[in-house]
Amino acid sequence: MVNNETQYATCVRYVDALQVPPGYSVEKIAVFGATSMAEGCQRGMEASTAYYKIYLHQDLYLVHRDLLSELLYLFRTYPRLGLVGVEGATRLPAAVLYSVNNPLHCYGRHWTFRRPGGLSSLLGPANRRRLHFNRFRSFIGDYLPAVVVDGFFMATQYDLPWTSPLGGFELYDKVRAVEFIAGGLEVGIARQQMTWCLHWGSLQEPTLQQRMRRQSDLQRKVAAFRQLYGGHIGVQARKLYALRRGTEGGLGKDPAGEHLGVVIAAINGRERLIRSLRAMLPQCEGLNEVEYKVVVVDSATSDSTVEAVRQEFPQVTVVASPASGGLAGAFNVGLRELGFPSFLLVMRDDAELSAGTLARMVSYLREHPSTAGVVASRIDPDGTIVGTTRALVRGEVFFDVGLYDDRFSSCHEDRDWSIRARRKGYTFAYLPEARVLHHHRNQPRRVGPAGFVERALDDLWLAYKHTGRRRAALLYWVQRMRAAWLALRWRHDRETLRQISEAMAQTNELYRRFREENRRPQLL
């Protein structure tokens, strides 16, 4: 909504300075003469052809150049995440305004340009406006499920109608959050790798009369909000979402009938993939009243794997894997091809299901509706159980937890997904009679310089994502010491030294990024 051409022009300059990811374009729509914030946003939404949308105040400047890439990652990885902000709360206080008497439940950060408070306010006109870092509590993970986000920045991946039961330009963000939650979607506060926004504020200070009028109008709207949405006040976000998705009672059934989706990442060549499909497909066909679809994601194999699969298994869908993204990227390609059926099984091509395994897993989930997934045993060729392996997971759980994090290039994509599922409160069952043979078990684990090079970056990213910046920084210095020791030990091997140097260059870049989370923004 625009009522000041100067601030709008500045806002557009910052938008134009953003780095646009390949394959995307930016559409800018200005709304003039809106009678309410919801009415103006509805007009903007209807005028736009974009799939993803960002709703901004005219005095909100996007100062982080890579904001669009980070936002796209969130939306493409987390399909239930409908609305994203940079500040908000996990509980609405009785005052409805999320930052009032609610310090333990407010999260996020942004830069502001305002006059300092406290004793500085006694300086009068000499108390000039300046950049101030506005920070609430921090959190771990890619985003934090919330009950409200501040309306100066709201990004969406679904178009829900904007309603205006309160009218005007106050509390519209609270109403918008309620609408998304009622629609079965999540509202989230983004964990910004660098602070995304600078809220400049109005160019003119409001008069005392204007402040009093606004306060009176706000009090009336707060009373109306309590009457309309009282059930959202004082309720923790986790409990609110648990009630919405039904985890307290049981996971629902697909009214269209049960469907099974299988994703197989082809990375080990034709022989193992064919063997895996020969063990898998008869079990899929033997399931009672379950339709199935198997997707093979080809990771640029060069031994005519695709042709062999299409010839022997015409019912199998074969899609190409992206050039980057590793195993997690291949899994995500298959998951997006399938959507979210009743049951999902994601596996590599070196996994071979023993006879009856799939039927046992499906039967268990039917009998235990509160269980999110069932984990199979990993066995040796002689049948000895040596651990656990892939799980058959309900599709709605994948929709809620999200896809795999394709920023993990070589490992930890399973561990990361499991951590996220546990935080959501989901439980999984171990079914020892469901057995999967992994043909890669006899391959030795890469240790020494090779293991360090393969895992260093993913280890650091996992620590940063799920334990926070301080522990990740500690791990980084441990990695530096280990790299120095390995370089000394292998100092006569130039190729090994080169690989260690490249691995440390990548970890150095990641370390630099998360050290600069709160860096002062560069102004245009």
Image: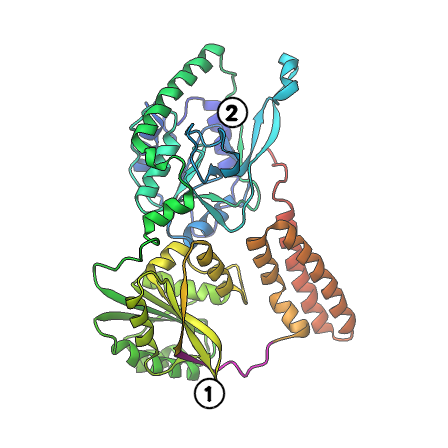
Amino acid type of the residue that numbered disc 1 sits on in the rendered structure: Pro
Amino acid type of the residue that numbered disc 2 sits on in the rendered structure: Gly
In the image, farthest residue toward the top: 209
Q: Is residue 24 above or below residue 432?
A: above
Question: Dot 2 surroundings within 10 Å: few (below 14), some, or many (20 or more)?
Answer: some
Front-most of residues 158 and 432: 432
Label of residue 395 in the image: none
Q: Which residue is mark 1?
A: 381
Circle 1 — which element?
loop
Kindly indicate the quadrant of the structure image that contains residue 178: top left
Identify the residue at horizontal 61%, vertical 36% (top origin): 522
Q: Quadrant of the C terminus?
A: top right
Image spot of residue 228 (x, y percent): 30, 30
Q: Which residue is mark 2?
A: 201
Which portion, as a residue range, is magenta? 434-445
2 vs 1, front mark: 1
| 519 relative to 354 in the view: left or right | right
- Distance between mark 2 and mark 1 Cα atoms: 67 Å
Residue 322 at least partly seen = no
| 35 relative to 126 in the view: left or right | left
Identify the residue at horizontal 37%, vertical 30% (top origin): 172
Identify the residue at horizontal 70%, vertical 73% (top origin): 495
Image spot of residue 462 (x, y percent): 57, 58
Image spot of residue 249 (x, y percent): 31, 54
Question: Dot 1 surroundings within 10 Å: few (below 14), some, or many (20 or more)?
Answer: few
Front-most of residues 467 and 19: 467
Q: Is residue 171 above or below residue 516?
A: above
Circle 2 — which element?
loop
